[in-house]
């Protein structure tokens, strides 16, 4: 009986540690991500071509390829992502950038930090 209680307490202890670690991972960097400044880009200064942009911040790290034609954003492709957001969220933020032709767009509700991470990667691509 004593052995069973020890095993159960060990399992509960491991689960608590895993849960705490997961919670720390999920919330680490949220505040800095929410406060991340995304700046507008001047497309008139950007020549035609495809530009790679990276934003690195823990689980919000991503890489995009932004194609510019005639001083307009023609397309944005996600090259690499480690975020766990849905493809719909990603396509929404990319559509907003292309529609507005700038990175100063509203973030997706419920995915503010992820949205800003993509916007920052796009900004970084266009401000090389």
Image (spheres, grey):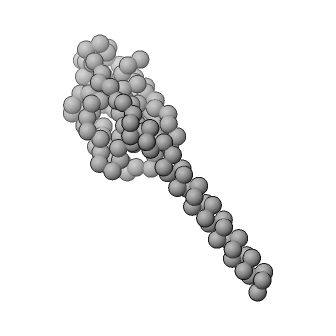
Q: Where is residue 53 in the image (x, y as percent from the top left)?
A: 43, 27
Q: Where is residue 72 in the image (x, y as percent from the top left)?
A: 25, 22
Q: Where is residue 113 in the image (x, y as percent from the top left)?
A: 39, 42
Identify the residue at image location x=69%, y=76%.
Answer: 8
Identify the residue at image location x=61%, y=64%.
Answer: 16
Count of marks placed on residues: 0
Residue found at the very far right of the displayed protein: 3
Identify the residue at image location x=24%, y=27%.
Answer: 101
Identify the residue at image location x=40%, y=49%.
Answer: 85
Residue 1 falls in which quadrant of the image? bottom right
Q: In this view, does 1 lie above or below 65?
A: below
- Depth check: 50 or 119 in front? 119
Q: In this view, does 109 lie to the left or right of 125?
A: left
Q: Is residue 5 left or right of residue 17?
A: right
Q: Is residue 102 above or below residue 7?
A: above
- Depth check: 124 or 21 in front? 21
Q: In which quarter of the image is the C terminus?
A: top left
Whether residue 94 is visible, yes or no, is: yes
Q: Is residue 21 left or right of residue 38?
A: right
Q: In this view, does 101 lie above or below 112?
A: above
Residue 13 falls in which quadrant of the image? bottom right
Whether residue 78 is visible, yes or no, is: no
Residue found at the very far bottom of the displayed protein: 1
- Depth check: 7 or 103 in front? 7
């Amino acid at each position: 009986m004593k052995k069973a209680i020890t095993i159960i307490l060990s399992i509960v202890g491991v689960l608590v540690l895993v849960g705490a670690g997961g919670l720390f991972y999920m919330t680490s960097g949220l505040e800095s991500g929410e406060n991340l400044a995304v700046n507008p880009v001047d497309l008139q200064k950007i020549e035609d071509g495809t530009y790679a942009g990276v934003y690195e911040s823990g689980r919000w790290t991503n890489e995009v390829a932004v194609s510019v034609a005639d001083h307009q954003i023609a397309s944005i492709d996600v090259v690499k992502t480690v975020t766990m957001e849905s493809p719909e969220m990603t396509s929404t933020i990319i559509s907003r950038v292309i529609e507005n032709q700038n990175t100063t767009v509203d973030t997706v509700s419920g995915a503010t930090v992820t949205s800003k991470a993509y916007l920052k990667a796009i900004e970084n691509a266009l401000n090389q």
